Image: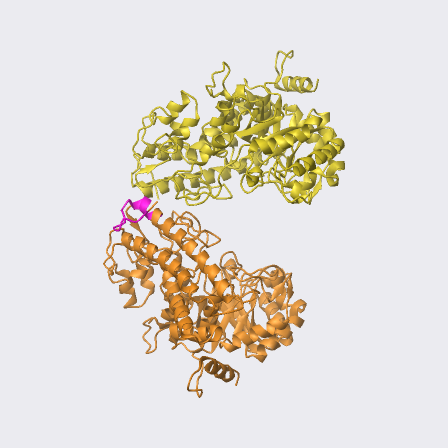
Chain colours: A orange, B yellow
């Protein structure tokens, strides 16, 4: 009834001729992960502060209802409301300090078919329970969790379960006690099982204290290395949450190989619509086509249905919402929130179909407006990729902040994200002659990725160390590709401003001006990306641009 | 009497045979600038929090007395207690909110022969006075300052005057109103003149919004470009405060050319013993020999006495003190505080003489201990320079934070501090064929600096754009010099640890352990500098190390 009502509204607004439709969701679990902190800040939030938390308090108000309706209208049915890095007061969300407002919020969400999830602090038995350990095989620890979950689910019967980031980037976890992630996840899963709860266990586990001199360790291997050996060992109310790519939400990455390696484990795909690395909602970057490509990637598991979309039981996205008036900072970032929900509901929809729907819902049915906004949206991800780090190498952004270019910013640091550019070559050898990461894929992906000619151009430098005069499938050399794409990307970003200006008078309520000002900022930032990246490679290679354009 | 008493104590402690001495200070003004904020933080402070301010309040307590005695004992006779970036409550130091405690502090300092100075907010007439302008030629503005100074000096008769950072890095100043720095400084000077007050006007004025693509603007020129034309226009109770080098407290810079260009203006030299760019008091870096070289540099003004030391009427240093138990964080940084005072008192002392004195005063007369600590101190500045940015180019540190290596960190930013390293060359051409900054020096300095062969090796890349195979006076190529110095520097930093270990048992009260732990950190950090800088140049040039050592 709920989804039918929203589908009807959508059809009416979009002027569909046929209102009668029969649909069922592609994926049972369609989720958002909020990285909201108890103090009201949002980690990687670019649209204001949290509307869930303020100064350690949980907020339940009119916006909670609007938010629930917003999510339901795009088909989302689960939301984890607090940051996976659970610190300070947020650890106490599973205590009676928060039960009353959480119960209220849970009921509001439930009214819109949305399950409330919380992120857990794995060290809670120590921080809350006064135990001297959080060892998952310690009976006292298991007993503490059982008791805590009994109490929590009694207070919050609508709770869906928990998201856990363990042994990752300084977070506590089972590794501390020589236990596996299966030990850790199952111990929690058993505590929530009586109440129908689920444990969503993140696979973002890697060595974040790497020595940059170390050429053998490969962060891109870590997810598979850590989780493939545990396939089949997880309880059936555990879901492994796997980031779309093997590293971390770059504008371009290959699909995580782990999707092809788990045969007996529930897993879901984690995307990021919070534009941490993709322009922070100051640049337009409509990501749905990228997500769609991920979902459509065949993993060659031997099963008949073997795409990522077939394999996962659900999808989640790190949310791009905040307490800004328009929810997402950039108006056009609304298309990512809308699009993610719609794609999770129906993975067969195309990115353009979804964009057209959203434009209709948000701006109305004017054909020129729809064409123009659709053109900007559909080009925005490729354009962002063009002026960013080239050919899948990623990470040429300002460390920590992740906005704006800094080609060597992560090159000599502990994060395992290197491009190793010298005067002669750039890229990492992830084939068997290097770190062997390509071996984590099933055939034929394994051979395709491992072969410098066959590997798709857009992932060339992710998998290979190549000379700058290496010829891509496009016929261009690596260096000329870098120059060309960066000039093109900045040019197209500037063109977005001109395209948008044609829409003046076609929308009200500040919607024209808000987007215009962000597109102007984007065009300036894109020119900076162009000049910094191109100058970096020009200075390093001294290979001139074939077209003789200005390099610095 | 005061200085005599301290001299006597020093002679007795050091075991001088001759106690009878007749001395008078080399410079009348011997000052410290504290960059302490009203909230208790210290800008570029590496030894705890402020002991002058906490939560907006001025602190006057036992430590104020100890501090006054400490400064007097090394010959300091003036101290500006608040940050030159005057913001928030600090703007109100010239109002009755602060007169009572300031008066108390001023009296304490006065008892030790120290004049209290404050840093002024140039926009105070607007922020405090409610005027709509701070134009120095606006009579209302001048009248506001006159009245304010009348009140302030009535409450604080011992006040020495004010330090002003105007039109610099976002601070307000006379440029806003199309006026000159002379207009601004003189307006204030006239307001404080009736009370014997002085205005210390900082010359650290440059464009901090530079486009990195712009090859014509040269930050190193800015100081002379801005102030040389104003020579003779400043009132005689104005003192221009000139940083030792033309850029900003790097481990190596040439002397500021402005010292040689002001014939009719009072000026003083500003040094930095807060080790912002020189290891942040986690590395040992005894700077006195560097300061001494600056003071001994001849500026060829046509006068008989023409060294920087002859030209200036005073010296100030950005202080390295805080509320740490040992005042300076690193015990050995105490030698910089001591040394700066002693050098200002007697510019004829050698850095080693001063080091020996300090060691005697702090550690006692043990000969082996004295030799070892003196060896470490005297080598520490050259060693820091070796593993840092090479040949005077500077700025290869982490942006903002300024600790640890980041070779391109400032390369594409707005700060005007570029090295322009390509595959073929590195450095800026500051000769007449480039920015012409060398023309700001008098002959023969002008010709020496402008000539790539004659220019001293340690300043080669400050003044010249050179190929990596350029031969230095040392006989080494630029690239081999980079490799060699970085290996040597890290090796020597590691050797400091071993040298220090020989001193175990020779000192008490944690003095052995405190320095040991910092030397260990320094040796690790120096190895990181070595590997990052060398790898940066290896990857860029692909010129191998002649000695075949490992590059990454």
Q: In the image, is residue B47 above or below residue B346?
A: below
Of residues A70 and B487, the one nearer the viewer is A70
Question: Where residue B197 sits: x, y (%)?
Answer: 67, 28
Residue B126 locus on image (x, y percent): 65, 43
Q: Quadrant of the C terminus of chain A?
A: top left
| Total labels drawn | 0
Residue extending farthest bottom: A20
Magenta-highlighted residues: A536-550
Is A443 drawn above or below residue A519 in the view shown? Answer: below
> Is A539 one of the magenta-colored residues?
yes
Q: Residue B54: percent from the left, percent from the top? A: 68, 43
The one of B78 and B545 positioned closer to us in this rendering: B78
Nearer the observer, B2 or B161: B161
Q: Is residue A491 magenta?
A: no
| SS assignment for the magenta stretch, majority | loop
Q: Quadrant of residue B327?
A: top right
**Residue B42 shows up from this direction:** yes
Above or below: residue B22 compared with residue B102: above
Q: Specify whether A313 is left or right of B28.
A: left
Q: Residue at x 65, y 71 (%)?
A: A101
Q: Residue at x 54, y 32 (%)?
A: B203
- Residue B92 at x, y percent in the picture: 69, 41
Q: Is residue A302 left or right of residue A46?
A: left
Q: Say if residue B319 shows up in the picture.
A: no
Query: Would you say B101 lies left or right of A221 here?
Result: right
């Amino acid at each position: 009834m709920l989804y039918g009502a929203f589908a009807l509204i959508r059809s009416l607004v979009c002027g569909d001729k046929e209102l009668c439709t029969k649909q069922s969701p592609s994926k049972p679990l369609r989720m958002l992960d909020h990285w909201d902190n108890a103090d009201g800040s949002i980690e990687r939030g670019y649209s204001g502060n949290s509307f869930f938390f303020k100064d350690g308090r949980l907020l339940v108000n009119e916006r909670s209802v609007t938010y629930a309706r917003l999510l339901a209208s795009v088909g989302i049915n689960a939301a984890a409301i607090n940051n996976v890095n659970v610190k300070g007061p947020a650890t106490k969300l599973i205590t009676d300090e928060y039960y009353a407002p959480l119960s209220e919020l849970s009921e509001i969400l439930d009214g819109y078919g949305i399950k409330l999830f919380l992120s857990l602090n794995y060290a809670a038995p120590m921080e809350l329970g006064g135990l001297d350990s959080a060892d998952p095989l310690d009976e006292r620890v298991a007993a503490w969790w059982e008791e805590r979950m009994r109490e929590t689910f009694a207070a919050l019967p609508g709770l869906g379960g928990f998201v856990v980031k363990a042994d990752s980037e300084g977070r506590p976890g089972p590794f501390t006690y020589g236990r596996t992630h299966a030990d850790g996840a199952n111990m929690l899963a058993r505590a929530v099982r009586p109440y129908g709860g689920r444990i969503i266990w993140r696979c973002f586990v890697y060595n974040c204290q790497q020595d940059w001199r170390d050429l053998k360790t490969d962060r891109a291997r870590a997810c598979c290395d850590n989780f493939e050996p545990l396939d089949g060992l997880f309880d059936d109310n555990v879901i492994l949450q796997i980031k779309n790519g093997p590293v971390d939400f770059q504008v371009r990455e290959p699909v995580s190989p782990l999707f092809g390696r788990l045969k007996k484990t529930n897993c879901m795909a984690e995307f990021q619509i919070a534009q941490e690395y993709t322009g922070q909602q100051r640049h337009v970057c409509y990501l749905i086509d990228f997500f769609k490509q991920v979902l459509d990637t065949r993993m060659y598991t031997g099963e008949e249905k073997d795409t990522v979309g077939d394999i996962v039981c659900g999808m989640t996205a790190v949310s791009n919402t905040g307490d800004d008036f328009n929810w997402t900072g950039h108006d056009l970032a609304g298309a990512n929130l809308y699009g993610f929900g719609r794609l999770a509901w129906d993975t067969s929809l195309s990115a353009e179909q979804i964009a057209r729907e959203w434009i209709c819902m948000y701006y109305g049915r004017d054909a020129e407006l729809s064409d123009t906004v659709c053109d900007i949206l559909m080009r925005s991800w490729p354009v962002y990729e063009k002026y960013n780090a080239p050919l899948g190498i990623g990470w040429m952004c300002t460390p920590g902040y992740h906005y704006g270019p800094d080609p060597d910013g992560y090159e000599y640091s502990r994060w395992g994200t290197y491009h190793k550019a010298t005067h002669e070559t750039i890229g990492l050898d992830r084939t068997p002659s290097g770190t062997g990461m390509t071996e984590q894929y099933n055939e034929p992906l394994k051979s395709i990725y491992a072969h410098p000619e066959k590997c798709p151009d857009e992932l060339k430098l992710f998998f290979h160390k190549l000379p700058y005069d290496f010829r891509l499938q496009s016929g261009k050399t690596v260096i000329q590709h870098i120059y060309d794409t960066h000039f093109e990307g900045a040019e197209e970003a500037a063109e977005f401003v001109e395209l948008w200006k044609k829409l003046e008078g076609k929308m009200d309520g500040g919607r024209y001006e808000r987007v215009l000002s962000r597109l102007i900022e984007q065009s300036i930032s894109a020119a900076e990306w162009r000049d910094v990246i191109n100058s970096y490679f020009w200075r390093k290679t001294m290979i001139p641009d074939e077209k003789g354009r200005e390099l610095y």
